[in-house]
């Protein structure tokens, strides 16, 4: 059998996406399938049924993560895992997350069709509550599995109606027995829509995801002196908003200077007293910096601090620039990235390297297991919106790359334990 000619059944994959699109349907094209809701239960039940019919053993852990496992010829070896999430945003689309789960299922169905025995087991995971819009934070099930979030704290979380995570998980029948863990996994892959415009703009079908951007978030406070807008001469003012405006301009310049890859945003702004005829005495605003390279991200921080100091001294202001969050960039495993690239070549697809601007379950898993991601285009780069759209061909393409990557890793001698 020529491995390069292996192909998934794109029509069957599409049918599963369409079937999922009927469960929690919103305004014709979208989905509202909040985690641990009745719609989430219905989707989970159908997925588990499909997975069992495909010969998988299905297990559920204590946070509701689902693991569907196709045995390998040597079942004692660590599995090759893939998956994503089945919950959606309040007004979400049909592909975000769902494509990753259904692609995993389609790979297993394809391996079955071909009577293809992999050396390692292949496992499809459904991570609970990736979106975080009913119970925050996001990427919860994978976060508990890697030990980043505490299970009891997650259980105690309540939604807007006061219903707790644990009660709701129990009510839909997905409070499982196993302790949440990534498990014995040799590699993890996630197929996902890009959620950005780059693949479409570059006319590429596959994004070979190198990792995810790092982030640094700041709260900047400038304090000057409130005074009357009429009698106070320009030369003697301590105008906090003038200083802040200089920094906003600097933030944008830093974003442009640190290309490629930088994003720099001031998204929140609070002026006090916010009165037409009073010189602003106090301004508080946010700065959001992102970059795929840690050293460049740190240099952006240094540039911000220099710009803040200059603006504050120019206006005679008190300054506080506090970093409130730092997430280092994530670099995916080189063997997994290479397997994705080889998969795109084997499937004859136009591909490019890309860095994820959003968080994904794969980002969590990458802290414990070798991980890679496959992006496919979505129309106009739009997601978290019911107009989110992807084509049947692009979904099938992403799934074909996953098939090749999984076969590559599932039979790779170098990944076997000593
Ligand atoms: Zn997603």
Image (cartoon, rainbow, N blue to C red):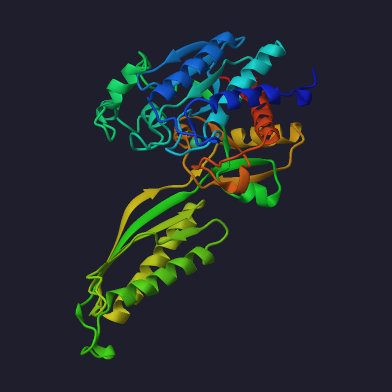
Q: Residue at coordinates 57% horizontally, 36% vertically from top-left?
A: 192
In this picture, residue 29 sits left or right of residue 146: right
Q: Quadrant of the C terminus?
A: top right
Q: Residue at coordinates 58% horizontally, 9% vertically from top-left?
A: 53
User: Residue 235 versus residue 346: which sits nearer the camera?
Assistant: 235
In the current view of this chain or complex, which residue is farthest to the front?
27
Residue 178: x percent and y percent? 37, 15
In this picture, residue 116 sits left or right of residue 237: right
Image label count: 0
Q: Residue at coordinates 56% horizontally, 14% vertically from top-left?
A: 50
Residue 387: x percent and y percent? 55, 42
Residue 226: x percent and y percent? 20, 77
Q: Quadrant of the N terminus?
A: top right
Location of residue 110 with respect to 392 vertically, above or below: above
Q: Is residue 55 visible?
A: no
Q: Residue at coordinates 67% horizontally, 52% vertically from top-left?
A: 201
Q: Quadrant of residue 29?
A: top right
User: Residue 10 versus residue 219: which sits nearer the camera?
Assistant: 10
Q: Quadrant of residue 60?
A: top left
Residue 390: x percent and y percent? 63, 38
User: Residue 51 versus residue 121: which sits nearer the camera?
Assistant: 51
Location of residue 259 with respect to 129 vertically, above or below: below
In this picture, residue 9 sits left or right of residue 316: right
Q: Is residue 321 visible?
A: yes
């Amino acid at each position: 059998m020529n491995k390069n000619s292996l192909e998934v059944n794109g029509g069957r994959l599409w049918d599963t996406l369409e079937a999922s699109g009927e469960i929690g349907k919103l305004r014709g094209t979208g989905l509202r399938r909040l985690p641990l809701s009745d719609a989430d239960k219905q989707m989970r039940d159908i997925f588990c049924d499909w997975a069992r019919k495909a010969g998988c053993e299905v297990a559920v852990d204590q946070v509701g993560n689902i693991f569907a496992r196709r045995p390998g010829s040597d079942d004692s070896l660590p599995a090759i895992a893939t998956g994503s999430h089945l919950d959606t945003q309040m007004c979400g689309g049909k592909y975000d997350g769902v494509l990753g789960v259904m692609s995993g299922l389609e790979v297993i169905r394809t391996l079955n069709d071909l009577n293809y025995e992999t050396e390692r087991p292949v496992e499809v995971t459904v991570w609970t509550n990736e979106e975080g819009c009913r119970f925050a934070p996001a990427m919860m099930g994978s976060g508990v599995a890697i030990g980043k979030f505490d299970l009891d704290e997650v259980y105690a979380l309540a939604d807007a109606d006061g219903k707790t995570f644990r009660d709701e998980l129990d009510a839909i029948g997905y409070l499982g027995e196993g302790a949440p863990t990534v498990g014995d996994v040799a590699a993890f892959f996630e197929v996902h829509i890009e959620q950005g415009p780059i693949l479409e703009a570059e006319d590429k079908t596959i994004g070979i995801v190198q990792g995810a951007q790092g982030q640094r978030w700041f709260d900047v406070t400038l304090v000057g002196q409130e005074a009357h807008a009429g009698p106070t001469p320009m030369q003697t003012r301590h105008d906090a908003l003038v200083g802040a405006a200089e920094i906003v301009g600097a933030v944008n310049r830093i974003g442009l200077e640190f290309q490629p890859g930088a994003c720099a945003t001031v998204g929140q702004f609070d002026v006090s007293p916010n009165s037409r005829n009073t010189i602003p005495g106090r301004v508080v605003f946010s700065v959001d910096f992102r970059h795929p390279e840690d050293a460049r991200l740190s240099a952006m921080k240094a540039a911000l601090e220099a710009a803040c100091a200059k603006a504050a001294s120019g206006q005679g202001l008190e300054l506080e620039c506090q970093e409130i969050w730092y997430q280092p960039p994530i670099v995916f495993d080189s063997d997994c990235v290479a397997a994705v690239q080889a998969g795109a070549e084997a499937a004859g697809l136009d591909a490019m390297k890309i860095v994820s601007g959003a968080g994904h379950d794969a980002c969590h898993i990458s802290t414990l297991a070798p991980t890679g991601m496959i992006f496919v285009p979505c129309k106009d780069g739009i997601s978290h919106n019911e107009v989110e759209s992807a084509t049947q061909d692009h979904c099938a393409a992403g799934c074909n790359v996953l098939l090749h990557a999984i076969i590559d890793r599932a039979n790779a001698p170098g990944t076997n334990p000593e």
